[in-house]
Image (tube, rainbow, N blue to C red):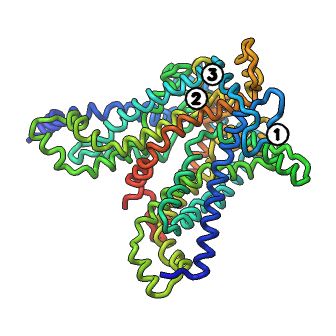
Amino acid sequence: MRKSTGEKVFEFFNTAGMFLFMLSTLYPMWYIFIISLTDTSNTSTANIYLLPGKLSLDSYKAVVMNAQLINGFRISVLRVVIGVSLTLLVCSLGAYVLSRRHFKGSRFFNMMIVVSMFISAGMIPFFLIVRSMGLVNNFWGLIIPFAYDPFGIILIRNYFFNIPASLEESARIDGANDLKVYMKIIIPISMPILATMALFWSVWFWNDFIYASFLVTKKDLLPIQTILLQIVNGASNATALAKISARGIRLRANGESIKNAAIIASIVPILVVYPFVQKYFVQGITLGSVKE
Amino acid sequence: MTKRQKFFKIAKEQWMLWLMLMPCVVLLLLFSYLPMFGIVVAFQKYEIAKGFFHSNFIGLKNFERFLQDPMIKNVVRNTLGLSSLKLLISFPIPIIFALLLNEFRMGTYKKLVQTVSYLPHFVSWVIVIGIFKKMLSSEDGVVNLLIQQLGFERINFVVASWFMWPLAIFTDVWKETGWSAIIYLAALTAIDPTLYEAAKVDGANRWKQMLNITLPGIKSTIIILLILAIPSIVGSNVEQMWVLGTLPVRDITEVIDTYVLRIGLGGAQYSVAAAAGLIKTVISVTLLVLVNNIARRIGERGVY
């Protein structure tokens, strides 16, 4: 079929517009990236906008040599790995039970979960409760209060609902109990939704700074995002960081470029896993949410 | 079978399911429902040493103190102003984006745009604001480089109060447009393609097809998301506003959620902060019920 002139004009502008959209999405990250790669010892980065100036990896060296930043990355990685594993276990077990139609009490517990999605007590009572349990300034305080996600349970449960009952029948005949059915049959074929949720939760645990900055004040427990918050808002001086890093070795990096290198370093883990899980999450989010 | 026998029969059959459900229920009770009872601090003169059970009840004094705070005028203005602007700007943009993306017939380009568009959603607010503050820096930011090249004076955006709301809206759009569009794109794929064929036969051009088939096709999705968005008019993106709210611009960036954190957890005035938070929750739940009822009355499916 031939296209009208109007259609051709529209398609041209739409294609060009989307190109601009991609450019404006990627450029800010690209800009920080090229600055983090630039030698800032003698010249300012004021004239850099497309390609890095005189190349230097010293900003990254300074990040690696900075004990506080490295510890922040360590805490964040631990938080993601332990937090996501625990959340996956807790939520998939719960979702399995709630997907059993013969389970007495599933109506009640479903209700409990839905209510908790709409009504929350707010930050202050939450914080006071968490503190009364001794979870403030405690690594587990960054994990246990968040190892449960009502949206996640509902999404996973919806996925389990769609698994044909015939799949587990033969196992049942062989005398498998619920735990066995869950581990041997349900979990292996639910990888798309579990991968999706693992991605969401990883991003949450990795990116959270607001809870972390109130639950943790001890320096050696601060996750990387909280340290970056202090640097970005000037509460902690980036130049001081540069000095700590230098430790007598002359690095061609100043506070600004270390900050930018740390920013890039904190995005990299997301960029690395992103292409692999990308195909899963659209599928996962739409499976759970727009079911009519 | 008596009730007792029935109970034991079910207990015998389902004890393992109960055990599997326990971790989830325990966390739900401890960190979601227990704090709901912890809201009593809003009516107490809460002292850490005395705890929930021994602190004195002082009626509505905390609410009074919150309402008498000179900061509250700004807080209310910022909260309502920013949320209304977001509802006007950040809410429709993903819909338009999804509609435009839907017009691409070729798969690869569409997919590329989509992949790129999700990316900023996965970057934390600290990083997003950090990146934009760097770009806007008056000393060496790229935006001021451009302004200077064009022959104008450099502007110190980062400490300019007037610039904070536009920055909040812009970063919100930059970060979440692609992500928010997912749900509309999913709804778009559910539209029956034969409708378009029929429209073509009737001589409808693409604009007409969009108005008469595509938009009605995603109408219920839009309404559900609108119902969920309206109660958040008293809410805000606490992470975004927390990072934006540095001292020089705080008058213009402080919203209820950041105010609660600042006086509650920052200033240890737990009771006043909890009272402020409670007011917010009550308003937003009321709005949700209200809007949901209206939606159902005009014949739409509500969210509950």
Mark 1 lies on residue: A46
Q: Earlier in the sequence, mark 3 or mark 1?
A: 1
In the image, farthest residue toward the front: A54
Q: Nearer the viewer, residue B172 or A9?
A: A9
Q: Residue at x 43, y 51 (%)?
A: A285
Q: Are marks 1 and 2 in contact (CB under 8 Å)?
A: no
Classify mark 1: residues with Cα within 10 Å, few (<14), some (14-19) or many (20+).
Answer: some
Q: For the point 56% across and 19% down, which residue is it? A: A137
- Sequence-wise, the earlier of marks 1 and 2 is 1
Q: Are marks 3 and 2 on the same chain?
A: yes
Callout in the foreground (1, 2): 1
Residues B39 and A48: in front is: A48
In primary-sequence order, the first of circles 3 and 2 is: 3
The correct choice, above or below, for A32 with respect to B180 in the image is: above
Which of the 4 image quadrants contains residue A238? top right
Across and down, in percent, residue A36 comes to: 70, 33
Q: Is residue B67 visible?
A: no
Disc 1: host chain: A
The amino acid pointed to by label 1 is Ala
Q: Secondary structure at mark 2?
A: helix
- Whether residue B132 is visible here, answered yes or no, is yes
Position in image of residue B151 (x %, y %): 91, 53
Q: Residue A198 occupies which quadrant of the picture?
A: top left
Q: Residue at x 58, y 77 (%)?
A: A7
Q: What residue sits right under mark 2 in the picture?
A: A212
Answer left or right for A100 relative to A58: left
What residue is pinned by disc 3?
Answer: A64
Q: Nearer the viewer, residue B268 or A80?
A: A80
Within-10-Å neighbours for mark 2: few <14, some 14–19, many 20+: many
Q: CA distance from mark 3 to mark 1?
A: 25 Å
